[in-house]
Image: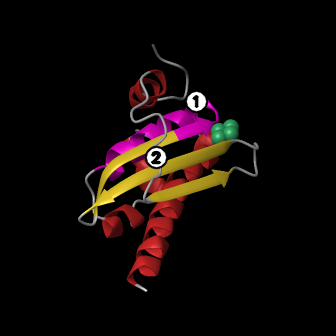
Amino acid sequence: MSQPGYSDKVMDHFMNPRNVGVIEDPDGYGKVGNPTCGDVMEMFIRVKDDRIEEIKFRTFGCGAAIATSSMTTEMALGKTVEEGLKITRDEVGRELGGLPPNKMHCSNLAADALHMALEDYLNKAAVRKG
Ligand code: FES
């Protein structure tokens, strides 16, 4: 199924989103809202030996937000915390084969929520170390 302006990859991740759900008691949690449209994105991560071993998202967002979140979780899974922090909004858009210009803001949610979850993890780790 294709939609004007959306790549097949976007449609695939929209129709079959990966890593949807929540992680109970996550090691890191991020929640961001999109001021442009009011949609909300949550990202949950579990970290082991400095690697993202599990990641889930939940969104009240549009199709592009679902597709970019799904792609972001795939890109982040298995990466180190530092590598995850380097995943940019633009990279997510590129991996999806681009997004229509009026939907580029939707991809911001996923990358921002991932970074927030990783920073939450780092803050908690710093507290644990004292
Ligand atoms: Fe709200 Fe895309 S329109 S995230």
The residue under the point 43% across, 80% down is: 126
Per the image, label 1 sits on a secondary structure element best described as helix
Label 1 CB less than 8 angstroms from ligand 1? yes
State the quadrant of the C terminus: bottom left
In the displayed structure, would residue 65 be above or below residue 78? Answer: above
State the quadrant of the N terminus: top left
Q: How far from the left and from the top, in percent, is residue 100? A: 57, 37
Q: How far from the left and from the top, in percent, is residue 115? A: 49, 62
Residue 63 got which mark?
Answer: 1
Q: Main secondary structure of the magenta part?
A: helix
**Toward which corner of the image does residue 63 lie, by quadrant?**
top right
Q: How far from the left and from the top, in percent, is residue 125? A: 41, 74
Q: Earlier in the sequence, mark 2 or mark 1?
A: 1
Per the image, label 2 sits on a secondary structure element best described as helix
Whether the magenta-drawn stretch holds residue 69 is answered as yes
Of 14 and 117, nearer the camera is 117
Give the side of residue 16 with respect to residue 62, left or right. Answer: left
- Real-space Cα separation, disc 2 to disc 1, in angstroms: 14 Å
Label 1 environment density (alpha carbons within 10 Å; few <14, some 14–19, many ≥20): some
Whether the magenta-drawn stretch holds residue 87 is answered as no
The residue to which callout 2 is attached is 93
